[in-house]
Image (spheres, helix red, strand yellow):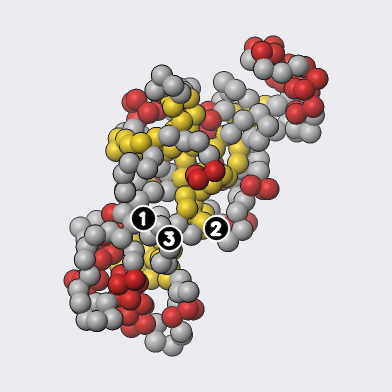
């Protein structure tokens, strides 16, 4: 198995810089993202965007969608020594060229053979995780597009995806896209490694929720931290007012020399002891 965080960090080096979201928490520092932005060509896995390649892909795929003049206008600014890929091709390129595991599958095969914890978006309260795959299904239920959670803007998941010929590899907001399903690629990737980026804790609408918040509540109860009324937390996985009060009490006890609004990230063991949860507190 591979560490899914390594794949996401690698993918972020290939996004277009204009798609970066100011103030977002990404799996890779923004200064290291967009180092080698890639374009999109349907059916490709990291192909060089020289003129011969562009001619071939027009003749094989794009002649049905647009005129040659339209195609040339879209690709005119592309580097002729750069690279392009398609949606699943982004992951296939990582496995093929970074892990020496030649791979060329499609989104449907990813969903069918590599994924577990499958769900329709909006029909589960499980917290999104870095590297979680999000899919779009067609009317027949076949997965035709895939992207991956690469960070968060507050409580909103951000997605890295090879979007289309007009966009290339970009970061998008989950709420602004038409993904239909979500899943963890647990048969290929390890999601239990400690992530480098902290979980941002703040009271939001809707509330941040999921197993990581439940583990946090269990840990805080075990350490004796309560809400402002002295009551133990309900271990419901929801980051509401009472949970934030206990988190603030814990953070104040860990950093007495700076105000809560300036506290650094802090670490709490998970409830099962398998890994640590790193959090960063934001107070409003």
The x and y percentages for residue 270 are 26, 61
Q: Is residue 50 visible?
A: yes
The x and y percentages for residue 218 are 22, 65
The x and y percentages for residue 140 are 41, 19
Name the residue beneath numbered marker 2.
24
Name the residue beneath numbered marker 1.
194
Other residues around mark 2 within 10 Å, as few (<14) / some (14–19) / many (≥20): some
Horizontal side of 130 relative to 272 (left or right) equals right
Horizontal side of 165 relative to 283 (left or right) equals right
The Cα–Cα distance between marks 3 and 1, rounded to whole angstroms, is: 27 Å
The x and y percentages for residue 279 are 39, 66
Could you say whether the residue bearing mark 1 is in a helix, strand or loop? loop
Give the number of the mark in front: 3 or 1.
3
Q: Nearer the viewer, residue 11 or 220?
A: 220
Which image quarter is the N terminus in?
top left
The image quarter containing residue 165 is: top right
The Cα–Cα distance between marks 3 and 2, rounded to whole angstroms, is: 17 Å
Could you say whether the residue bearing mark 3 is in a helix, strand or loop? loop
Residue 133 to residue 54: above or below = below
**Circles 3 and 2: CB atoms closer than 8 Å:** no
Name the residue beneath numbered marker 3.
205
**Mark before the other along the chain sequence, 2 or 1:** 2
Residue 58 to residue 34: above or below = above
**Residue under the image location 37 percent in, 82 percent down:** 252
Horizontal side of 207 relative to 171 (left or right) equals left
The image quarter containing residue 113 is: top left
**Residue under the image location 28 percent in, 81 percent down:** 228
């Amino acid at each position: 198995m591979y560490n899914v965080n390594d794949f996401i960090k690698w993918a972020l080096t290939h996004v277009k810089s204009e798609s970066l979201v100011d103030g977002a928490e990404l799996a890779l520092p923004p200064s290291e993202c967009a180092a080698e932005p890639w374009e999109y060509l349907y059916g490709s896995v990291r192909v060089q965007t020289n003129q011969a390649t562009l001619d071939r892909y027009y003749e094989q795929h794009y002649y049905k969608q647009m005129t040659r003049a339209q195609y040339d206008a879209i690709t005119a600014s592309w580097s002729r020594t750069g690279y392009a890929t398609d949606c699943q091709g982004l992951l296939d390129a990582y496995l093929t060229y970074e892990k020496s595991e030649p791979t060329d599958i499609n989104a449907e095969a990813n969903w069918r053979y590599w994924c577990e914890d499958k769900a329709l978006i909006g029909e589960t309260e499980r917290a999104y995780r870095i590297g979680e795959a999000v899919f779009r299904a067609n009317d027949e239920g076949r997965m035709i597009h895939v992207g991956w959670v690469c960070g968060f803007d507050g409580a909103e998941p951000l997605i890295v995806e090879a979007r289309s010929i007009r966009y290339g590899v970009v970061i998008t907001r989950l709420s602004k896209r038409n993904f239909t399903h979500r899943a963890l690629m647990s048969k290929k990737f390890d999601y239990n490694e400690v992530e480098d980026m902290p979980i941002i804790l703040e009271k939001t609408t809707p509330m941040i929720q999921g197993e990581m918040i439940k583990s946090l509540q269990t840990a805080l109860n075990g350490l004796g931290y309560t809400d402002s009324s002295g009551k133990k937390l309900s271990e419901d996985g929801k980051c509401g007012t009472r949970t934030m009060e206990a988190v603030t009490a814990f953070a104040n006890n860990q950093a007495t020399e700076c105000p809560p609004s300036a506290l650094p990230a802090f670490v709490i063991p998970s409830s099962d002891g398998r890994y640590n949860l790193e959090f960063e507190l934001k107070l409003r």
